[in-house]
Amino acid sequence: MTQIANTIIQQVIALDPWAFGAYGSCDFLPILDCADYAGGLSFTVNGKRHKGNVMIFLKWSDVYQIIFVSKDGIPVKEIDEVYCDELVRALDYIEGMNYSR
């Protein structure tokens, strides 16, 4: 696991120690850096609203972009400009909550 992927995991746990369990999360994989992103984290979820994959990208501007992908590989929702203290509120889409600032 990369440092960025571990940091994302720790940030989510710090906000809500039960979040990953509540989402039915498994298969955690790091996302490597590229021209648009410093790296990130990908994992599979089995939530109330969303079943599939979640990709959290750390942008070079130090904010996150979260993409929810169906089991068929189709992006179903994208949330941009998420700050670290908003991660759990944004990820709660998995369980049927709507994210707003």
Image: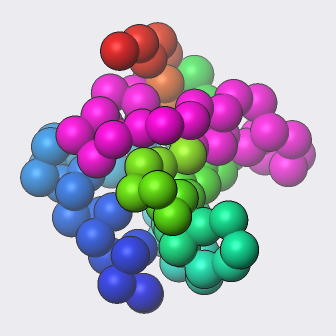
Residue 59 visible here: yes
Identify the image quadrant of residue 33: bottom right
Quarter the N terminus occupies: bottom left
Q: Is residue 94 shown left or right of residue 92? A: right
Question: Start and end of the magenta stretch?
Answer: 66-92
Which residue is painted at 76% across and 30% down in the image? 76
Give coordinates of residue 84: x percent, y percent.
Answer: 28, 47
Residue 98 placement, left or right of 19: right
Please state the horizontal and vertical placement of residue 14, each as a whole percent of the image.
11, 52
Q: What residue is shown at x 21% (from left), y 64% (from top)?
A: 10
**Which part of the image, by quadrant, shows the C terminus?**
top left
Residue 54, compared with residue 1, is above or below; it is: above
Residue shown at 56% from the left, 35% from the top: 80
In the shown orientation, is residue 13 left or right of residue 101?
A: left
> Residue 82's spot in the image, x, y percent?
42, 38
Decide if residue 29 is in sight here.
no
How many circles with numbers are drawn on the protein? 0
Task: Judge whether residue 9 is colored magenta.
Answer: no
Q: Residue at x 49, y 24 (%)?
A: 93
